[in-house]
Image (spheres, rainbow, N blue to C red):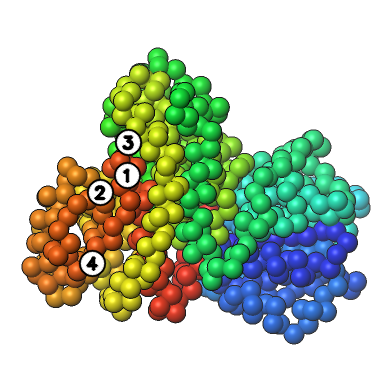
Amino acid sequence: MCGIVGYIGTKKASPILINGLIRLEYRGYDSAGISTVEKNGLSLMKDMGRVKNLYNLKGIDDLEGTIGIAHTRWATHGKPSKENSHPHMDNSKTFSVVHNGIIENYNELRKFLTDNGYTFYSQTDTEVIPNLIHYYYKKETNSDISRLLKAVQKACLDLIGSFALEILCCDFPDNMIVVRKDSPLVIGKGSDECYISSDIPAILSFTRDFYLLKDYEFVLLQRGSAKFYDKDLNEIDKETTTIEWDASSSEKNGYDDYMLKEIYEQPIAIRETIGSRINSNSKTEFDELNFTKEYLSSVNKIYFVACGTAMHAALVGKNLMEKLCRISSEVDIASEFRYRDPLVDKNSLCIFISQSGETADTIAALKLSKEKGAKTISISNVIGSSLTREADYSIYTHAGPEIAVASTKAYTSQVTLLSVLAIYFSEILELNSDLINKLKSELLELPKKIETTLTLADKIKDFAMQVYQEKDMFFLGRGIDEAVAKEAALKLKEISYIHAESYAAGELKHGAIALIENDVTVITVMTDSKLVEKTVSNIQEVATRGAKTLVVTNQDIDCNLFDKVIHIPEVHPYLAPIISVIPLQLFAYYISKEKGLDVDKPRNLAKSVTVE
Ligand code: F6R
């Protein structure tokens, strides 16, 4: 977590940096800070809380420097406070550093540095970095820029953990060094300037040409030039990658919040994700994959590994893979996968799903699967993200930048891509051809059906207004609908702070039904005709105990049995999660709004979880 941004060029840096921080605030908002190269040395301004506190600081407008670094924090080591805010400086104030990541051996390094006369003023792991650079810098005898490069390199080689760093040095006021290991960092190339950021959308309005860095690539930035060095400081060549995202896609475009905008972007996100992969008259295409019938027949198990919402998408993926391809599949929470000694081997296919492609647990799980000899596929929304660089094969959702912390369009795009993938495998395996043709034509109709679903917003808002003050809610579903119930409960929890539980509809009566009393809200997703009768009985069980019931369905049911029914368009049950979740995203959104909460930046959360 944490967001870092940097600028080196000819313009005044501080407004660019603050603008970048505002866009990166979704990565953490415990404190913010900035450091620029001024005529009289390195400036340092920081404060607790959101970026707006920083730009309200007296003197911030007086910063004239055209080189600077900035940081917005999600606290890990050390509570949110001004002292713990970044940038951090070394004792001699020669270096200013911002850091995203975690230094695992900071205690040892702190002791080493303390023994060597350094003093620490914060509780952060980061503060060791500028001081360690200074320690090596003192030992270098040459006076040119290689002194700085070597000191940074030596310090980085001592760090265990993850880091994306921007470093300023007052002795070399026209330079900046950046480097990353296991934490995201991109460099946007302008004509005579460079923009540095934790993610692409934050600087997309300045450039579409990006240098994507590998671990331990050191970059020396000067106005108008970027030199790249490998771990041993040998100079290397690097090409830029052009990102096709439209700059306006990372703006709110008239919506109150990013989340609402992203909910409404789902028809286009789904259309783009399907792209030219599905054609009704020909076989499904994945240019990125080259799987054969022989290979897929040899796969003994598919492991889907992900966190949070992406893990909920995986639950749908497992269902589809088993139903359409008859390949046994499992879903693992990435943070558990590594520690349960999974039975992954060379006949396993492991699929890792991550919107950001930077989730530390998911990346670690991928590395483990590769060590065990499995083939790996990454599904991500961010080109060149760390996960995609590690995987044997990378395929992308094309949802466009997702800025709101609560994932919406990324989730439905992930489920769409998993559906397309299951269809692709099934065609290679020559299975279920009639069903596959039906699903393909239904997939192509999905964007229209999502548009229709979005017109239900007012009805959903009405129901949200009736229940927004509640403390607990339950979400039920059977089969694939249970995966949607899980996602709906998570959405509600994270942005409205209402406690929500999801259950397989038939499981509630084995214990949790004891919690149902008068007026508790129970929301059920019901999209499979084969499961309707049983699910309706389960709703009756809670209704007779006083529950208020909302049903999201496309089935022909007796509406008098429920307090509210939201009718969504008909769709094959295997594809229903892509539609049925949308009313429940809106439901969570309207409740959060009514409670006056910050929908896009819920408390304690960060969009991209780069710590394990
Ligand atoms: C919830 C949400 C999170 C993410 C999870 C994984 O709305 O967004 O649960 O799904 O942190 O993130 P990615 O997909 O970036 O790996």
Type of the residue with mark 4: Lys
| Drawn side of residue 25 relative to residue 606, left or right | right
Give how far across and how far down residue 491 sits, in percent.
38, 62
Can residue 522 be seen in this snapshot?
yes
Q: Residue at x 55, y 28 (%)?
A: 288
Residue position marked by numbered label 3 in the rendering? 320
The quarter holding residue 134 reads: bottom right
Disc assigned to residue 522: none
2 or 3: mark nearer the eye: 2
Residue position marked by numbered label 4 in the rendering? 564
At label 3, counting other C-alpha atoms closer than 10 Å, the crowd grade (few under 14, some 14-19, many 20 or more) is many
568 and 482: which one is in front? Answer: 568
Distance from the alpha carbon under mark 4 to that under mark 3: 30 Å
Confirm or deny contact between disc 2 and disc 3 (CB under 8 A). Answer: no
Q: Tag 4, which secondary structure?
A: strand
The quarter holding residue 71 reads: bottom right
Earlier residue among tags 4 and 2: 2
Q: Tag 2, which secondary structure?
A: loop
Earlier residue among tags 4 and 1: 4
Confirm or deny contact between disc 4 and disc 3 (CB under 8 A). Answer: no
Distance from the alpha carbon under mark 2 to that under mark 3: 15 Å
Earlier residue among tags 2 and 3: 3
Earlier residue among tags 4 and 3: 3
Q: Is mark 4 within 8 Å of ligand 1?
A: no
